[in-house]
Amino acid sequence: MTYFVPIVGTHCSGKTTLAEKLTNLAQKKGHKAMFVSEVARDCPFPMHEGQTEEATQWILEEQKKREDALRNLDLDIVFCDRSFADPFFYFFAKKENRPTLNQFLIENKKVCGKTLYKMSVEYTARYRHTIFQELSEEELLQVEEDGFRDTNLNYRKEIQIIARKLFVWLTDCIFINQKPLTNPINDENHHNMILDVVLSNCESKYRRDSNLFGY
C-alpha cells in the first residue's frame, strides 16, 4: 500500500522544502519514499490572478498524471508538492463577485466539469493524509520575487484562508503545520514529529477503510 501525502497551502510557504525533508527522513528510517514536484511552473496557460479554466484543468490533470506514474513502483509513501485540488482554490480566488466558499460548496458549482462533491470523493480516495502549511502574518511577508510567484500580500493571505477552508472540508485527515518558515530548516525533531503523525494517521486510516470493505 502506497500512501500519498500532499503538502498544501499558499505559495511560498515552504512546501517543496518540507516535501524534500520528509522524503529524505522517511528514506533514512527505511521507508521507500519519493516526492512529486510542483507542476504549476510547467503550465502553458496564465497563472495566479490571471489563472484560466484551461490552466486549472491542465494543472489538475498533470498533477494526477505525475502521481499515478509512481503508483506501480512499490513505494511506502509519496510526498506531493501540492495536490490536484490546489488549482481549484486559485481559480476560485480570482473570480469576481464570488460567493463565500461555503455558498460555493453548497451550490455545487462545476469547475472544469468536476463537481466539488466528486472532487472530495476523489481526494479522499487518492490521499491518505494532508499537511497544510499555515503561515503567520510575519511569514506572509517573507516572499522573494522570482518572476513567477505572486508577491501581493493580500492575495497570498486570501489564498491561505480559502485553501484552509477547502482542505478542512475535503478531508478530516489533515495536519496543520503552523509557522513553517519560522521552524529551523534543519530541525529534525520537528520533521520527525510530522512524519510520525502522518504515518500513524495513514496507517490507522488504511485499517479503518479496510475494515469497512471487509479486508
Image (cartoon, helix red, strand yellow):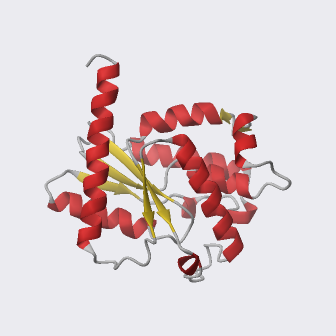
Where on the picture, by quarter, is residue 68? top left
Q: Indicate the quadrant containing the N terminus: top left, top right, bottom left or bottom right.
A: top left
Query: Foreground: 213 or 33?
Result: 213
Residue 141 x/y as whole percent: 59, 81
Residue 118 x/y as whole percent: 59, 31
204 to the left or right of 177: left
Where on the picture, by quarter, is residue 57? top right
Where on the picture, by quarter, is residue 154? bottom right
Query: Foreground: 30 or 153?
Result: 153
46 to the left or right of 73: right
Q: Is residue 188 above or below residue 37?
A: below
* Residue at 38% across, 49% down: 5
Q: Residue furthest left?
A: 30
Q: Is residue 33 above or below residue 25?
A: above
* Residue at 34% across, 56% down: 35
Query: Foreground: 75 or 104?
Result: 104
